[in-house]
Structure formats: C-alpha cells, structure tokens
Amino acid sequence: MLGVMTALHVLICFGLIIVVLLQTGKGTGLASVFGGGGGETVFGGKGFGGMLAKATGVLAVLFMLTSITLSVMPKGSGQTESALDRNRPATEAPVEAPGGAGSQGLPQGQ
C-alpha cells in the first residue's frame, strides 16, 4: 500500500508542476513555449485559464491529502505503528532495576 501511495503522490507532484507551468502569468509565460498560447483561441479568453486553475486546485488538494496520508502510514515491513502512535507520550512511569543505583555487580560498600 505504501508503494501505491508513493507512486500516486509522485504522479500528482508531476501533474501539479506541469499545470502550474502551463498557466499564463502577466506576460506570455511558459504556455506559449509548449504551444499553450494558441489554446486560448480555442477555449476562449477565460475558458482555458479557468480549466487550468481548477486543475491546479484539485491537484493541490490531492497533493496535500497524499502528503498527510504518507506521513501517517506505517513505514517499512517490520513496523506496525504509524508516526502518530510513535509520538504518543508513555502513560506508565519507567521501571527501576532491582537493587537501586548500586546494582552493577559490585557490593554496596565499595
């Protein structure tokens, strides 16, 4: 499951990068380099930009959701708890070794 989520996250990252770079800024932008400048005549003045803005929003939300999911999921084959479980404070006090401070195998008087 971790591999599937990681692959999905990487695909969403690349999609988000491409959609953001294709958007037109105040100038011509990168859209004209890849042929996106001519798309404005096909989709209209605002239609293509609106579609890219919606795609950016959807991909940004998906990016955030996959990021949160990946941070909470358990990692590795032997690990069974998530990051949230590992960071919980211990509810029990630590147990002291029997014999107190002098229990290193030496008699108490030395």
Image (cartoon, helix red, strand yellow):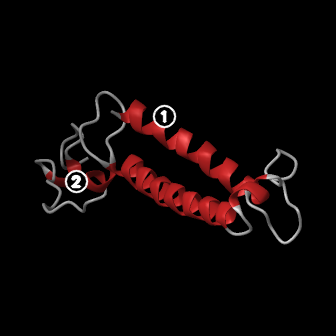
Looking at the picture, tell me which residue is in the foreground, 76 or 65: 65
- In the rendering, at what x and y percent does residue 53 appear? 61, 64
In this rendering, the answer to whether 99 lies above or below 40 is above
Q: Secondary structure at mark 1?
A: helix
Looking at the picture, tell me which residue is in the foreground, 88 or 101: 88
Q: Tell me: 8 left or right of 42.
A: left
What quarter of the picture does the N terminus occupy?
Answer: top left
CA gap between label 2 and label 1 equals: 52 Å
Q: Earlier in the sequence, mark 2 or mark 1?
A: 1
In this rendering, the answer to whether 60 lies above or below 3 is below
Report which residue position mark 1 lands on. Answer: 7
Residue at image position (76%, 59%) is 40
Report which residue position mark 2 lands on. Answer: 101
In this rendering, the answer to whether 50 lies above or below 12 is below
- In the rendering, at what x and y percent does residue 74 appear? 31, 41
Residue at image position (87%, 47%) is 33
Q: Tell me: 47 left or right of 82.
A: right
**Tags 2 and 1 in contact by the CB under 8 Å rule?**
no
Q: From the viewer's perspective, is the residue at label 2 or at label 1 nearer?
A: 1
- In the rendering, at what x and y percent does residue 42 appear? 73, 55
Residue at image position (46%, 54%) is 62
The amino acid on which the numbered mark 1 sits, given as a three-letter code, is Ala
Give residue 23's quadrant in the image: bottom right
Residue at image position (74%, 68%) is 45
